[in-house]
Amino acid sequence: MKKLLLLALSAIPYFASAQTTHKYLIKTGKLFDSETGQFKTGLDVLVDGNKIEAVKADKDLSGEEKKDRELIDLSKYTILPGLIDSHTHLLFREELQAGMDFSTLSLEKVLTQQGDAYRAIYGAVRAKAYLEAGITSVQDLGNSGKFADIALRKAIEDGLVVGPRMSCAGQGLSSEGGQLPGLIYQHRNIANDEYRIITSADDAIQAVRENVTQGANVIKIYSNNTPNRTALSVDEMRAIVKEAHRYNLRVTAHATDNQAVYNAVIAGVDGIEHGYKVNDSTLMLMAKKKVILVPTDGDSTIYANYAAIAYPGDKNVASQLKKMTDAQANRLQRALKFGVTVAAGSDDYIDVHMPYSAFSKHTLIGYHEEGVSILQLLQFATINAAKQLNMPNKIGNLKPGFLADIIAVDSNVDTDIHAIMNVHFVMKDGVVYVNK
């Protein structure tokens, strides 16, 4: 028995306990200050346990401050706060096939042929890839079965698997049918395995309480749920928002067209996911109410891969994609013009034959292709995303008292956003996971 116990203990990751009180002195080349949106040089980061103790000029560092610290020399690289993806689905993968469109039955296949156990294993593999790519926090917005996302979060927190810090929605709150197209009435209850179907304002309040009890950090709602035609009413969404705010939880809404965005905003939501089609007046209302926009826009690589898989040989795809990406860029630029806060989010669930986590970071490249500066898009993925995750004083910034989430990428990221793909160092919560 003693031998078995020793073997079990040896399987627990070293980082789960031994390094939690470690002290580091990290020398930086360039450091991204997410608060000011500037790159700074000549700075050192002092880490004590899981928090940043100080960020000081190297020349001002005293001998006492250097004492008893492990030195990590990252002076050849650019240091960023750990990246944050505000819209993930770690436990869901849509497998593309030729001719598939957005009325795909891929989710029905997941629910009826894979189940939560398979999805949990898949999610654990993706979570590890995300962390090792420098994405230290995510907001996982449903499509995880019955609270499998919260189980994955617990496994990460318990040190059973490696992954980013997770803010979890649990089941998304939706009107009849969820996003499962074509279910005949006899099988309509399959939607309950993936969504919490709302039947009234009172039921909406109960649904919030169910998710809170199961450990949700955020409430995800569907202001519209295309490809199905049903939608939550404004009264139902207001009830959800009021109840969620009682527990200091933010509410973020899937909303793809202007009416859905407007309805969610007047209902009081804190965030809008997607917002592909939205009028100027609605964007101005979002800015006034401080509603965050999470534009889940891909880049040219994602769309090229998608087209090659789903529409092989189709000569019209390129022009259609150009029209779509131009519209997305226009929407994003208008949102910034009117003062809407934007947070980075990938909506990474479609398998476009890229390495796990690459989709998420290519979304940042997509923002740059849409005309956003590198400095501003890095704020999308750090300080702005921290607000969307309801953690503005804990993550997304390299300053004293914040959690020690620190990554290093190629030094030229300030001039070439593609450098974001090359990660040389990852620390989450003061624990080193990648050090090349």
Image: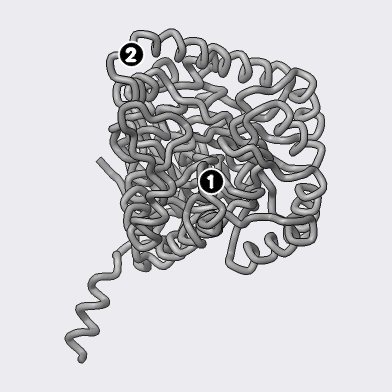
Q: Earlier in the sequence, mark 2 or mark 1?
A: 1
Q: Amino acid at mark 1?
A: Ala
Q: Residues within 10 Å of mark 2 (few under 14, many from 20)?
A: few
The residue positioned 73% from the left and 35% from the top of the image is: 291
The answer to whether mark 2 and mark 1 are in CB contact below 8 A is: no
Position in image of residue 320 (x %, y %): 46, 12
Q: Is residue 349 left or right of residue 122?
A: right
Position in image of residue 4 (x %, y %): 20, 84
Task: Name the residue beneath numbered marker 1.
Answer: 54
Q: State the separation of the CA atoms marked 2 and 1.
A: 55 Å
Position in image of residue 9 (x %, y %): 27, 76
Q: Residues within 10 Å of mark 1 (few under 14, many from 20)?
A: some
Task: Name the residue beneath numbered marker 2.
Answer: 314
Q: Quadrant of residue 344?
A: top right
Reply above or below: 374 against 11.
above
The residue positioned 54% from the left and 11% from the top of the image is: 326
Colour scheme in the image?
one colour
The residue positioned 80% from the left and 28% from the top of the image is: 285
Q: Is residue 52 visible?
A: no
Quick one: quadrant of the N terminus?
Answer: bottom left
Position in image of residue 176 (x %, y %): 64, 50
Q: Count the numbered circles shown.
A: 2
Reply above or below: 141 against 23.
above
Q: Quadrant of residue 266?
A: top right
